[in-house]
Amino acid sequence: MLDPKGRVVMVSGAPRGVGRAIAERLLDQDRPVVDFFLDGAPAQARAGDTLLTAILAGGHGHVRHSEFGDGPRAGFCWMGACQDCFVLVEGRGARRACGTLLEPGMKLRRR
Amino acid sequence: MTRADVLVLGGGGAGCSAALHLARRGADVVLLERGLVGSQASGVNHGGVRQQGRHPAEIPLAIRSRALWSRMRELCGTDAEFDPCGHLKLARGEAEEAELLRWNEMAAEHGLKASMLGRNAIRAQHPYFSDRVVAGSLLAEDGSANPRLLASALARSAREAGATLLEHHEVTAIEPGFRVEASGREFEAPVLLNCAGFWGGKIAETFGEPVPVYPLNPNMLVTEPLPFFCTRNLGVVGGDVYLRQIARGNVIFGGGRGESDPALPTSRPLPEPAFAAMARAVEIIPHLADAMIIRCWTGIDGGMPDALPVLGPSRTTSGLIHAFGFSGHGFMLGPAIGAILSELVLDGRTDVPLEAFDIGRFARQTALAEDASKTRLE
Amino acid sequence: MSVVVVGAGPAGVRAVERLVAAGLRPIWIEEAPDGGGRVFQKPPPGFSRGHRALYGADHGRAFALHAALAALKPLTDWRPDTLVWNLRPGDLDVVSDGTHERLGWERIILCTGAMDRVVPIPGWTQPGVTSLGAAQIALKTQGLAIGRRVALCGTGPLLLLLAQQLTKVGAPPVLVLESAAWSTTLRAVPGLAWNPAAALRGMAWRAGLKVQTGAVPLRVEEGCTALRWRDSRGWEHRTEVDAVAMGWGLKPETQLADLAGARFAFDRLQRLWLPERDAAGRASVPGVYLAGDGASIGGSVVAELAGTRAALAVLQDIGEKPDPLETTLLDRALAREARFRRALERAFPYPHALAAAMPDETLLCRCEAITAAEMRASAAPEINRGKAATRVGMGRCQGRLCGPPAAEVLAQAIGCDIAEVGRLRGQMPVKPVVL
């Protein structure tokens, strides 16, 4: 019997797609395109997207950086509980990205 | 029955520091704390380490304590995040500016060097202030610390020095002598230190010297981490708001009062003073308007009508020494209060003048007030 | 009579329905833009999938609940998009789109719902790692998969359900790690004719899902490119992924009950501190009623029953005389469901040993970025003292996520029973607010 301690079994992934955009548009995506701004740059999403969806499905990777230097964050619970997806909406202040619907022309700023 | 040289009632900053100083000098000390050390006023306050703005009578205490803060690591193994960032007290009008000048002049007699910042200087150095701020007084050697860390560190060092600190020991009976019952155990010592904060009033009353102490619940708030902008610990003349930004970015501020039931004990912050403190903070620092508040809290301190503590020997009972009623500004003083108490116990004297804190002042005032009312009646 | 209902999920809808039937017009507060709760959350306008696609086997109940919700809104003081951020005897503070208001209450039913319970692991704060609930909400309300190569880890019905849902829409997870061992599942329910846990497993198996049982995640690698995990025999594996969803059961959102002053007790089975309540939902504080997953995890069927029951308790307490048969039937149904629930809890327990043993470098508190090592080093006698010493639980979420695992870490560090380290006390505001 082999001692499993310290041994690692490798399972390889698919050749593409690993570690890229988070959130994959899968169903119900034939909705009108909505323009918005992310950190000053024009970006596009779909009507009915939350800010979190707009950012992540758009391939922008994260919604904020931890204030304490441990890297980017992209929320966790998607239900307004973890408080980890605040993003600045110009003119409205900090909003939870998971519970706020994108509106045309919104200017989002990541911290 | 546990016998000791000194019994300390109350595990706040003053009580824990007293236990530490006494134990370091070889006294056999037992400290009794109802909950956990540092649970009330000394653990949940704003964390100001400030001589700035104090009543003249408190300045010698504050100077003595400030010296201890510089060697806090030596005293208790941690600096409790003490940062000598300076305390800047702000004036929001000419009357307040005059008040700053008066205080600075008085403090200079005690050797404290506060410097005035006029309208231009304060605008140049602190561009985030609004026009409401017309002047400030900076006491550069003041600062701030993390109140959550101090009492427990002092307690740990006191234990290491040989003191016995018993948490979850609520005092249920006190008799002269002194015999104290707590959690079904009996303790006896010739000296009793009353460091019990608001509850110190009840202990004083037991020995026939009631004082008009009331539960004081400073309403505290903290924002989410914000980009760093402010190095100084900030206050205002009148004290209706005070704030500081910690190195992690959060702005901690206070103002107004929460509510409490000292009998349980329980305390909770309230929305109205939180709104008011926020409004006052925004009045001087407009960009705080969008800051999210992530938590509010309060605790229970002993407030005195004259905002001065009761500190010194009992008037009725030999061997009993009071140190309570710090009225919301005792955190910074705690370390020195403990040192002073140890001197009173072991040397019978201390260099710091304590007359203004005499418990007898209330009896005199009551007598005066009664005389006055009699006069009116006649 | 000012009656307030907080929450418009299954419990809230049924509570309001019963109050309205008795002629009351409650104030009804919901934090989300619309009701339904998390389980029956609706996609925003513009999405086209129907109830059957969105809610699967529960589509009938979802449809009924949405219909009730729509019918009840005009009969109440309906306040969506509104956060209750403070609660005291007699009043509460709400904010809606930046506007604050103080409301009075004489009776209040808290139907505050639940969130995922986690075991923090190294790397779990990175983009790409979400809760199981998050992955399900993404799919249900946004039509998203959280990644292309998704690993699911956790325990219980939600894990298997989500795996099935993803598979059904053509995005099967690359890895499903169920922390409970098969033996635990089978032992869980002696005396019940039907083993809900085993049934779930059977369904998963028939759906063609390969589930690693007794398996736990160890670490999410840098950039969320791979998950290290351990199987039931102790072998370590590395699987390349681009997203990980995790959740070991649910935990109630009890912050408002806490602020109301409700007494809490430690529930050994759920291994959580729960607000005490009687069979009808009355909390220890007069005028406060608790229903649904916000009081104790029971699932949406229980929540609907408990919502109605709590409303009946309110009616009884204000002197109405509802039909005793109605309460009897409800109480019986609730007792029956509770037996199944206990079986589920035993079948899919929170892996507390995994939490207690989390590596030192794990970011235990993600808000404040505090490691497990710091909590261990505090050697605090109870969790609030640990919070004071380390800042664990002091951040934006106030310990919602880190509270239970932090208690496990501390209890093991100081060698005491989990109940003895206590629970993090809640403070206003229950969520960040601009004042």
Image: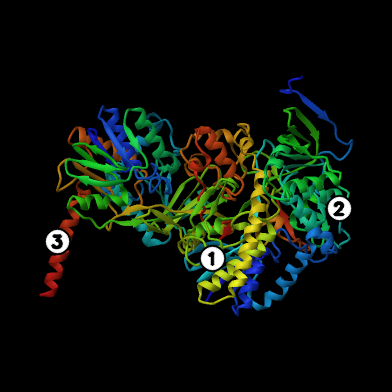
Q: Is residue C27 above or below residue B324?
A: below
As rendered, which of C413 and B337 lies closer to the eye? C413
- Could you say whether the residue bearing mark 3 is in a helix, strand or loop? helix
* Chain letter of disc 3 in the image: B
Looking at the image, is B369 positioned above or below residue B90?
below
Return the chain for callout 1.
Answer: C
Real-space Cα separation, disc 2 to disc 1, in angstroms:
40 Å
- Does residue C55 appear in this view? yes
The residue tagged with tag 2: helix, strand or loop? loop
For badge 1, the amino acid type reads: Asp
Residue sticking out furthest to the bottom: C23
- Of badges 1 and 3, the one in the foreground is 1
Marks 2,1: beta carbons within 8 A: no
Instruction: Determine whether the residue tagged by mark 1 lies in a helix, strand or loop.
Output: strand
Q: Which mark is residue C93?
A: 1
Q: Residues within 10 Å of mark 3 (few under 14, many from 20)?
A: few
- Comparing B167 with B139, the one in front is B167
Estimate the spatial distance between the alpha carbons at disc 3 and disc 2, rounded to whole Å. 83 Å
Position of residue A82 in the picture relative to residue B248 (left or right): right
Position in image of residue B283 (x %, y %): 50, 61
- State the CA–CA distance, disc 1 to disc 3: 46 Å
**What is the chain identity of the residue bearing mark 2?**
A
Residue position for label 3: B367
Q: Is residue B376 above or below residue C289?
A: below
Residue under pointer 2: A26
